[in-house]
């Protein structure tokens, strides 16, 4: 609560009020994933910042934010398409605090009035996973589209498409037109799962 000192000027009082409002307003904070629930797409998140206050002896005391439970996680997608990725304990994220309470939207996706008077409350965060500090930057950052799963498993899309993995499974009919490879073989063979694989100039053009 803001205490009023009659000896302060109006300017000082307004500055104190501004500081007081800012200290209780949650906007964006850095968080860390403690656990992830893929079925509900929610996470338990700890805030990577400490609050501080001055005790009755004038000492600055640090204390932690409460751990946030069931924080909705942003999953990139649109229409019937989406991108999923493994979210693990220790991943860093941005926690975006909503203007109003999320409960009504979360359970129904319908526009409804808030049942509780909460604004930028710590209970109404959304996690955006993927931010990195200087100590855990992505090594060898690619200027191409790099779908990276591990050091020996990724797909790079640039001037060419490069697939790196020990095993590659292609399901469905695969076709290719006007694709050529220098000194590549042409022919067909039967795969281990009894499918006919057709190769033209070293390029697989059909699996049936």
Image (tube, grey):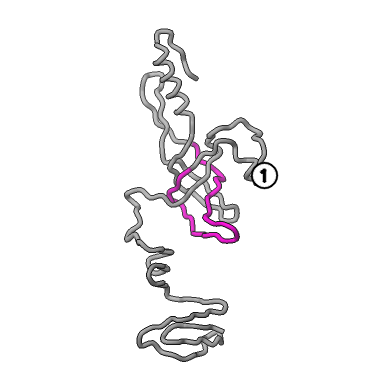
Image position, residue 174 (x, y; %) = 53, 79
183 relative to 172, above or below: below
Determine the residue positioned at 55% across, 43% down. 69
Residue at the spot of label 1: 110
Give the quadrant of the C terminus.
bottom right
Q: SS at mark 1?
A: loop
Determine the residue positioned at 54% across, 87% down. 196
Q: Residue 134: within the magenta?
A: no
Segment colored magenta: 66-95
As drawn, is 116 to the left or to the right of 66? right
Q: Residue 82: within the magenta?
A: yes
- Quick one: 81 or 152, which is closer to the camera? 81
Image position, residue 154 (x, y; %) = 42, 67
16 relative to 96, above or below: above
70 relative to 181, above or below: above
Residue 78 visible from this viewpoint? yes
As drawn, is 4 to the left or to the right of 70? left
Determine the residue positioned at 34% across, 53% down. 137
């Amino acid at each position: 609560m803001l205490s009023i000192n009659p000896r302060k000027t109006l300017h000082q009082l307004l500055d104190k009020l501004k500081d007081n409002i800012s200290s209780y307003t949650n906007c964006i904070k850095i968080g860390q994933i403690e656990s992830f629930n893929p079925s509900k797409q929610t996470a338990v998140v700890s805030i990577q910042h400490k609050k501080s206050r001055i005790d009755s002896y004038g000492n600055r005391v640090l204390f932690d934010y409460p751990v946030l439970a069931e924080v909705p996680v942003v999953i990139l997608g649109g229409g019937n398409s989406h991108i999923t990725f493994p979210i693990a304990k220790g991943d860093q994220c941005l926690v975006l605090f909503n203007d109003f309470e999320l409960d009504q939207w979360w359970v129904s996706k319908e526009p409804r009035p808030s049942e509780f008077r909460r604004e930028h409350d710590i209970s109404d965060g959304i996690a955006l996973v993927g931010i990195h500090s200087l100590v855990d930057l992505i090594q060898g950052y690619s200027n191409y589209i790099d779908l990276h799963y591990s050091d020996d498993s990724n797909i790079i899309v640039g001037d060419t498409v490069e697939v790196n993995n020990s095993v590659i499974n292609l399901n469905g009919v695969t076709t290719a037109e006007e694709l050529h490879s220098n000194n590549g073989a042409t022919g067909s063979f039967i795969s281990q799962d009894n499918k006919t694989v057709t190769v033209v100039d070293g390029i697989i053009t059909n699996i049936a």
